[in-house]
Image: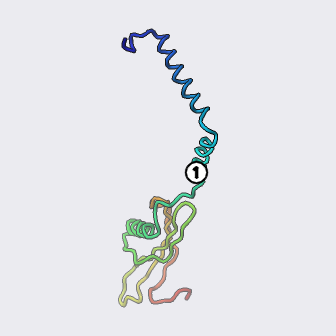
């Protein structure tokens, strides 16, 4: 007899029986196996997150964001630091080309990215002449 035609009460009895068997199997599973299973989940949760973005990709992404926002090509990466939720990168940009090149005006932008390379913030932190040393 097809299941649809069986009396409703009989189908309910079968469902209760299957449910009871499942509960019984979970109760009779050895204690050590249950502990191992639970510890495995704790280990997965406590394992440190590995960043989606490595340092090289973070620097490239930051340079692309600065180029897109300023319209100027990135000259180089001046700093790179792993933060709690992403990356903080310093990008150097030529703001004004001059002759000779040693008189170009450069700027440094600080870029914050999340772990996926998405822009969280950016700002210009410094402007200076190419020919001048740092802190002068």
* Pick the front one: 31 or 131: 31
The picture quadrant where one finds residue 131 is bottom left
Reply above or below: 40 against 87: above
Along the line of sight, the residue nearer the viewer: 130 or 16: 16
Picture quarter with the C terminus? bottom right
Circle 1 Cα neighbour tier, 10 Å, few/some/many (<14 / 14–19 / ≥20): few
Question: Element under label 1?
Answer: helix
Classify residue 101 as left or right of residue 50.
Answer: left
Q: In the image, residue 111 lies at what x, y percent?
A: 49, 67
> Which of the two residues, 44 or 58, is positioned nearer the viewer here?
44
Q: Where is residue 24 in the image (x, y as percent from the top left)?
A: 59, 28
Residue depicted at x 60% and y 44%? 38
Question: How far from the left and from the top, in percent, is residue 88?
Answer: 52, 68
Q: Give the residue at mark 1.
A: 45
Judge whether 44 appears above or below 2 on screen.
Answer: below
At x 47%, y 69%, the residue is 55
């Amino acid at each position: 007899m097809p299941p649809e035609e069986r009396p409703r009460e009989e189908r309910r009895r079968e469902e209760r029986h299957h449910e009871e068997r499942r509960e019984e199997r979970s109760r009779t599973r050895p204690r050590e196996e249950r502990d191992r299973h639970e510890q495995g989940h704790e280990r997965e949760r406590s394992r440190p997150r590995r960043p989606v973005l490595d340092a090289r990709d973070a620097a490239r992404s930051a340079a692309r964001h600065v180029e897109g926002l300023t319209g100027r090509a990135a000259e180089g990466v001046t700093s790179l630091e792993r933060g709690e939720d992403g990356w903080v990168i310093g990008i150097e940009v030529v703001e004004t080309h001059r002759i000779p090149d040693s008189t170009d005006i450069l700027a440094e932008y600080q870029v914050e990215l999340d772990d996926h390379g998405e822009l969280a913030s950016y700002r210009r932190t410094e402007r200076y002449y190419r020919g001048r040393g740092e802190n002068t």
